[in-house]
Image: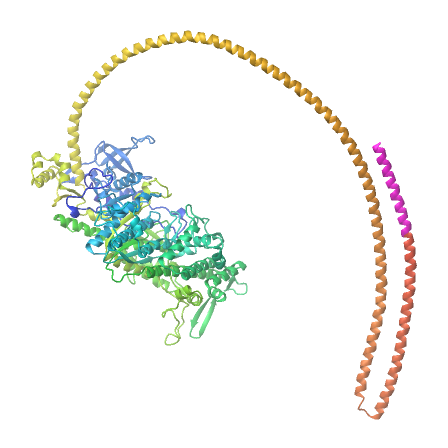
């Protein structure tokens, strides 16, 4: 930035400030508009996945600040023709650099050569003045006035621009011009009066600069130029996150839609504004503009909230940050009505879908769907709370202040209806969004049976997978297989490779990002299709809302792509500024040397050049799966080591530094390769293409280049299951198309500024704003302008300001002698290399300061003489007035003292009489009060004593009643306890006897069972013998007669044996029966004996219980007596 300060110089004197409007310049449209300090370009703060936002800080070290201000006041000392004129003198107000506030006000105390001593904080009650010595090139002259157009500032440098913006911001004037560039400072509060239809009508037809700065003025300038010249226009809105780009873009589109509606009303014969002024018949509320708005304008406007829902998110610095770039092309027909529109998006932040930092949020649509869906939708989509989903619960922030997710969901649905998305497609969109949420809850763990594979982590992951498959209408088993495996096709067939848990998680995230990216692209395509493009339209106005330059402590691939886009836009901006400078010099017909164009093509070549560019090297590394980020970094070091824009940091082996137009940025290569791959897994595409959901099947429908070959020369080669495509190359192609589109239009620039990092209204942080101005392309624009004649003034203004330096004062009033007078003034100041144009005087850098110091000395000398006489007259008049006042004061003082003494004497006598009466009254009152109090106290004491005696008597009677009742209750309780004890003893004894009888009867049953078992065994043995005999008989049937005889004998024997066995069985049965009868008789005898013993014991127990009860009754009676 050192060249910035050496190149800048005072520009020209400022005219009186206008509060509302400006008069037209005598030259009309040909009046010059300087473009010295075009604050276009931007530096947007990225809050994505590059790291925790709390650790991100602007790169603004003190050394860089000091370098940036080296000669920011070149007016501090300018040497011309061997002589030296110093614009820095004692008493001059200046700006000095400060480590905290960037620039602070100071006053020059003394000047010694090129060293200046300044006093900082003088005149500030809360700050103690302190002196500091600086170099003359380190201070900058202070501007006294505040201008709506900063090119009219006398001293156009960093502190001047900063001071002007800060003063206007404190008055809620958030818009400021810099030539034809509009600077918009975010107010962080609603200012509805600035954006109503009445305000639109005021700016309708007005030239740029006729009214106060406003975004409507830029939109009107673009619309008016398009209508007048028949050429397409573009409005480039830039700034960091939270600077207000999205809201500014909305207001531009609202104004263009308003103008399109007015044009439609005029073409249809509706009374409305005509020509270039606001409608005289309007009521002022803009109602007819809204009433005549056609569906095309409504669709264009409603596309904003729809894209915000799917493309905006809450970041650390902004609650509604756009996470994508957008170029809206609004087409107009021959009647200047909006006839169509096309929206192009750039570099959606895919990493935010799967990873967010606290306290950021994911895209708005996720929270809107969870909180705003109806009960029927919640059941159909199986929705839960945002805190239950992995993709939304990584941050503690779920809701936003002032934003109702349910209402925003209704607004998003309404926007879909207006844009023209059918109900079926809307439901399909919400199904995909819900499916992505469910996918985030699918987790994996290592498979215990397979070292290389993985399985679903738990039942919750299984349920989440089932929900995702059901919502997206895909096969759950195929979806699980696609996440856990990869299929590699070789000449010998397909090989299924299992993935470990980390790879499966990466596959899940890749699927989620692919789903959301395809869905976002589908929405943009659907919006474009619904709005429609007018093939017969020849003109359009494009509105570009894109991210600004980014530089964090840790920069990754996203910052690399964003800064590439800003390099492209900065080159386009430089070319535009250079062209306007040439037109200015040509219009004034002055001789000028070739201005060195500040070109950043070498940086663009370093990034984009084929084979040797960073993107080409990155794409080559991505094509080889085994390439690591260390190898990629080494390739960069080897290929680009000779470039002056490329360097290797000393403290890292995987980082590289690029010198951009806004400064050096160091990028970490760790994630470049992964983030540059935009592959689509074949298994994912196959599963989603087979979905029963029409939207998904259409989005993932295989294209000819993604379908597998059925045969041919390539059929035998091994194929990957992923189709590689590069995000960097794709983004480079998109930028090329964007720049080609912008080169066909006339550009208009709006630079949005974020005044503070805490998003608070009425807070202007100098260092923060200055950082954005430096990174917004100010340096390059100033270099272009200062290479020629940065200071320029109309001839009339020049002579009005510096005419007092002319030697021939009469020549100032002779028409045609202006060149001679100006030449004499320049000769007196010993200035060369200035030029006189047709209407302006052009000065080189620093020459305006020389003229200012000469003018200052001239005015100082004249002012000293005037002050001498004026002070003498003031002193004489002051003495006479003081003497007259003293005499009058003495006269009136004596009279006042006498009257005061008499009044005091009368007051004292009256006071004595009043005191006597008052003391008597007070004594009587005290006596009566005391007597009344004593009587009351006596009555109170007697009443207390009587009540105490009455209470004692009642207490004695109550005690006697209680005692009698207690004694009665105690006797009754003892009786009940005795009865209960006797009953308990009886019950226990009877239970014991019953259990003993039960055991006896069980034993008898067991013995009868044993006899029956023995009988059963004998019967079974008999049956077995019969079976054997039958078998033997059958085998001997066909034997000889002899055998038959033997068999008959055997049969006879068997019959005898059976008879013997039957007899034995009968005998055994009889013996068992007799034995059982004997045992039963014995048991009956024992039972009768035991029964008699139990009866005897029971009688004894009952006697004992009766005796105990009688004793208890006697004891109770004794106690009662």
Q: Which residue is at the front of the view, 890 or 131?
A: 890
From the image, which quarter does the C terminus lie in?
top right
Residue 294 rendering spot, x and y as whole percentages: 31, 55
Quarter where residue 957 is shown: top right
User: With 584 as the anchor, is 195 left or right in this view?
Assistant: right
Quarter where residue 876 is shown: top left
Residue 245 rendering spot, x and y as whole percentages: 32, 49
User: With 749 as the anchor, is 974 left or right in this view?
Assistant: right
Up-down relation of residue 565 to residue 61 (above or below):
below
Magenta segment boundaries in residue numbering: 1094-1121
Q: How is the image coloured?
A: rainbow
Up-down relation of residue 893 to residue 358 (above or below):
above
Residue 745 rendering spot, x and y as whole percentages: 23, 56
Residue 478 rendering spot, x and y as whole percentages: 48, 67
The answer, for residue 253, to whether it is visible in the render is yes
User: With 772 as the anchor, is 1040 left or right in this view?
Assistant: right
The answer, for residue 596, to whether it is visible in the render is no
Q: Is residue 1114 magenta?
A: yes
Q: Which residue is at the front of the view, 497 or 789?
A: 789
User: With 667 as the anchor, is 688 left or right in this view?
Assistant: right
Residue at x 85% of width, y 56% of height: 996
Up-down relation of residue 656 to residue 447 (above or below):
above
Q: Is residue 416 magenta?
A: no
What secondary structure characterizes most of the magenta part?
helix
């Amino acid at each position: 930035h050192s060249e910035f300060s050496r190149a800048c110089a005072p520009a020209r004197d400022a005219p009186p400030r206008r509060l509302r409007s400006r008069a037209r310049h005598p030259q009309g449209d040909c009046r010059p508009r300087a473009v010295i300090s075009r604050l276009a370009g931007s530096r947007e703060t990225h809050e994505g996945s590059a790291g925790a936002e709390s650790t991100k800080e602007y790169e603004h070290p003190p050394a860089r600040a000091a370098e940036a201000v080296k000669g920011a006041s070149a007016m501090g000392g300018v040497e011309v023709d061997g002589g030296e004129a110093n614009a820095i003198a004692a008493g001059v107000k200046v700006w000095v650099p400060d480590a905290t506030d960037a620039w602070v006000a100071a006053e020059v105390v003394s000047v010694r050569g090129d060293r200046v001593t300044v006093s900082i904080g003088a005149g500030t009650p809360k700050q103690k003045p302190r002196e500091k010595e600086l170099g003359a090139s380190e201070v900058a002259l202070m501007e006294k006035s505040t201008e709506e157009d900063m090119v009219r500032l006398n001293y156009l440098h960093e502190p001047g621009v900063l001071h002007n913006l800060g003063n206007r911001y404190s008055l809620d004037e958030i818009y400021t011009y810099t030539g034809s560039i509009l600077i918009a400072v975010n107010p962080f509060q609603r200012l509805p009066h600035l954006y109503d239809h009445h305000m639109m009508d005021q700016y309708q037809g007005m030239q740029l600069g006729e009214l106060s700065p406003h975004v409507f003025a830029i939109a009107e300038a673009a619309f008016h130029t398009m209508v007048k010249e028949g050429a397409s226009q573009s409005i480039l809105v830039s700034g960091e996150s939270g600077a207000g780009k999205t809201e500014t873009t909305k207001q531009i589109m609202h104004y263009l839609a308003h103008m399109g509606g007015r044009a439609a009303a005029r073409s249809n014969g509706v009374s409305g504004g005509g020509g270039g002024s606001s409608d005289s018949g309007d009521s002022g509320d803009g109602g007819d503009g809204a009433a005549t708005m056609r569906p095309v304008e409504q669709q264009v406007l409603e596309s904003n909230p729809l894209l915000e829902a799917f493309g905006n998110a809450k970041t650390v610095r902004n609650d509604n940050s756009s996470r994508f770039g957008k170029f809206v092309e609004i087409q107009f027909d021959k009647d200047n009505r909006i006839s169509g529109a096309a929206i192009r998006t750039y570099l959606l932040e895919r990493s935010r879908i799967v990873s967010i930092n606290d306290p950021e949020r994911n895209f708005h649509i996720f929270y809107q769907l969870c909180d705003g869906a109806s009960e029927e939708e919640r059941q159909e989509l199986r929705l839960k709370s945002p805190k239950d989903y992995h993709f939304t619960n990584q941050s503690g922030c779920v809701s936003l202040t002032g934003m109702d997710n349910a209402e925003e969901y209704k607004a998003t649905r309404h926007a879909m209806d207006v844009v023209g998305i059918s109900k079926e497609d809307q439901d399909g969109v919400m199904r995909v969004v819900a499916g992505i949420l469910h996918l985030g809850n699918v987790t994996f763990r290592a498979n215990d049976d397979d070292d290389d594979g993985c399985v679903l982590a738990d039942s919750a992951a299984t349920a989440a997978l089932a929900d995702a498959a059901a919502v997206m209408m895909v096969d759950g088993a195929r979806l699980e297989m696609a996440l856990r495996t990869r299929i590699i096709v070789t000449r010998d067939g397909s090989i299924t490779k299992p993935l470990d848990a980390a790879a499966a998680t990466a596959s899940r995230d890749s699927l989620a990002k692919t789903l959301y990216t395809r869905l976002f692209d589908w929405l943009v395509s659907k919006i474009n299709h619904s709005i429609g493009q007018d093939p017969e339209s020849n003109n359009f106005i494009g509105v570009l809302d894109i991210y600004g330059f980014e530089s964090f402590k840790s920069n990754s691939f996203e910052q690399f792509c964003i800064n590439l886009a800003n390099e492209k836009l900065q080159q386009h901006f430089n070319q535009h500024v250079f062209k306007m400078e040439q037109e200015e010099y040509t219009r004034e017909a002055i001789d000028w040397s070739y201005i060195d164009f500040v070109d950043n093509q070498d940086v663009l070549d370093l990034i984009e050049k084929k084979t040797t560019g960073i993107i080409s090297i990155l794409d080559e590394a991505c094509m080889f799966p085994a390439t690591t980020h260390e190898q990629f970094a080494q390739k960069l070091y080897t290929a680009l080591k000779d470039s002056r824009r490329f360097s290797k940091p000393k403290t890292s082996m995987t980082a590289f530094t690029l010198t951009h137009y806004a400064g050096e940025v160091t990028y970490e290569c760790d994630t470049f390769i992964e983030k540059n791959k935009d592959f689509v897994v074949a298994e994912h595409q196959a599963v989603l293409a087979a979905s029963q959901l029409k939207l998904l099947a259409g989005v993932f429908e295989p294209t000819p280049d993604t379908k597998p070959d059925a045969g041919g020369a390539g059929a035998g080669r091994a194929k990957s299951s992923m189709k590689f495509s590069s995000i960097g190359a794709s983004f480079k192609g998109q930028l090329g198309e964007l720049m080609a589109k912008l080169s066909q239009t006339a550009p208009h620039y709006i630079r949005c500024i974020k005044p503070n990092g805490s998003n608070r209204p009425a807070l202007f942080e100098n260092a923060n704003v200055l950082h954005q101005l430096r990174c917004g392309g100010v340096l390059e624009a100033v270099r272009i302008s200062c290479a020629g004649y940065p200071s320029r003034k109309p001839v009339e203004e020049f002579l009005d300001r510096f005419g007092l330096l002319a030697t021939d004062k009469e020549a100032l009033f002779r028409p045609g002698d202006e060149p001679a007078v100006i030449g004499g003034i320049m000769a007196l100041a010993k200035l060369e290399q200035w030029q006189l144009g047709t209407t302006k005087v052009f000065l080189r850098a620093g020459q305006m300061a020389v003229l200012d110091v000469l003018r200052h000395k001239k005015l100082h000398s004249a002012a000293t003489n005037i002050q001498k006489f004026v002070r003498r007259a003031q002193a004489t008049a002051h003495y006479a007035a003081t003497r007259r006042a003293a005499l009058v004061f003495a006269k009136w003082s004596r009279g006042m003292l006498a009257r005061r003494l008499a009044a005091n004497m009368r007051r004292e006598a009256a006071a004595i009489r009043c005191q006597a009466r008052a003391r008597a009254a007070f004594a009587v009152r005290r006596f009566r009060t005391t007597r009344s109090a004593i009587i009351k106290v006596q009555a109170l004491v007697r009443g207390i004593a009587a009540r105490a005696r009455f209470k004692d008597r009642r207490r004695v009677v109550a005690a006697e009643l209680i005692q009698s009742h207690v004694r009665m209750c105690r006797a009754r309780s003892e009786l009940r306890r005795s009865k209960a004890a006797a009953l308990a003893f009886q019950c226990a004894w009877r239970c014991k006897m019953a259990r003993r009888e039960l055991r006896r009867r069980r034993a008898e049953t067991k013995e009868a069972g044993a006899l029956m078992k023995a009988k059963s065994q004998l019967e079974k043995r008999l049956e077995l013998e019969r079976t054997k005999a039958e078998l033997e008989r059958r085998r001997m049937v066909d034997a000889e007669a002899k055998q038959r005889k033997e068999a008959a004998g055997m049969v006879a024997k068997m019959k005898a044996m059976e008879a013997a066995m039957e007899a034995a069985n009968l005998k055994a049965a009889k013996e068992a029966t007799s034995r059982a009868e004997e045992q039963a008789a014995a048991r009956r005898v024992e039972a009768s004996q035991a029964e008699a013993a139990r009866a005897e014991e029971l009688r004894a127990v009952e006697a004992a219980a009766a005796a105990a009860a009688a004793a208890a009754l006697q004891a109770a009676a004794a106690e009662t007596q």
